[in-house]
Image (tube, helix red, strand yellow):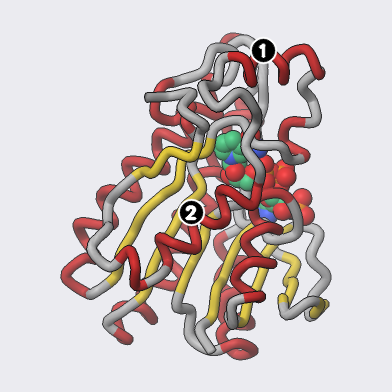
Amino acid sequence: MPHLLISGGSRGIGGACARLFAGNGYKVTSLSRSGKPGDFSEGVLYLRCDVKDPEEVKISVNKAIEENGPVDVLISNAGISVSGLAQDFSFQDYRDVMDTNFGGLFNLAGAVIPCMVRQGKGTILAVSSMWGQTGASCEALYSASKGAVDSYIKALAKELGPSGIRVNAVSPGATDTDMMSGFSDEVKEVISEDTPLGRLGRPEEVAETLFYLSSEKASFITGQIIGVNGGYLI
Ligand code: NDP
């Protein structure tokens, strides 16, 4: 059975991925801050791990490989957002957002690449954001962290293609998860109105795109940032 390692598989987009891949014959390991060590349910092994911490990531990835075998698909999904005026963000905000959203990808990719290169195959995926492509007012740090994700994904695709490893990202628009819970219904309504398809995205729609990108059906796709945004950004 193939092995999916995903960060933030406890809920939201990551939770939808964990369910979809587990339901399609994958062994799934989820790393999240709330995951209890060794807690196994619905075909998913949940491990507690803060993706900001490179040592925790190394230990957790080794544990995941011990339990579920070599990683075939990595999805770096865990992310946080902060809103506010650019001049009001603290240095700690900067560290938290960059170290989670970009550092998490850096730490996870660093931990799985050697094994994937030895196997001569594998797929690395990241959950970015359309704000990384276009920038969002009052989300300057978040936008910058996702811009870093996009550039890293493109560079990795060039570096790892010759080793048989494909590297892509999905770039969701506003998606109905806990991350949107800080927004009022009025704001969600405005975002929906500005979206050609007239609504927020569902986590399952992002998960399906990631599943496709991980599959042989996407065998000639690498280095791409695929929008899943209902046409908000065209
Ligand atoms: P949620 O807030 O619903 O879930 C976030 C997940 O990330 C949780 O599983 C959380 O688990 C985990 N997580 C957060 N920080 C860490 C950390 N330091 N270490 C390990 N796990 C962590 O978010 P979404 O599902 O909405 O977001 C998933 C991804 O999609 C993020 O990268 C986000 O930026 C991106 N995205 C979301 C959009 C949206 O509108 N929802 C739009 C565009 C992109 P726990 O708290 O247990 O650690």
Residue positioned 56% across, 85% down in the render:
65
Judge left or right: residue 39 versus residue 198.
right
- Residue 190: numbered disc: 1
Query: Residue 142 placed where, x, y %?
Result: 55, 29
Asked where in the image residue 193 lies, by quadrant, the reply is top right
Reading the chain from its start, which is encountered first: label 1 or label 2?
1
Disc 1 to disc 2, C-alpha distance? 25 Å
Which of 18/91 is in front? 18
Q: Residues within 10 Å of mark 1 (few under 14, many from 20)?
A: few
Where residue 72 appears, x then y in whole percent?
45, 78
Per the image, the residue denoted by label 2 is 209
State whether residue 57 is above or below residue 72: above
Residue 96 in sight here? no
Q: Name the spot of residue 213 as percent of width and height, x first.
A: 40, 60
Q: Amino acid at mark 2?
A: Thr
Q: In the drawing, does residue 230 fall left or right of residue 110?
A: right
Q: Is residue 232 left or right of residue 59?
A: left
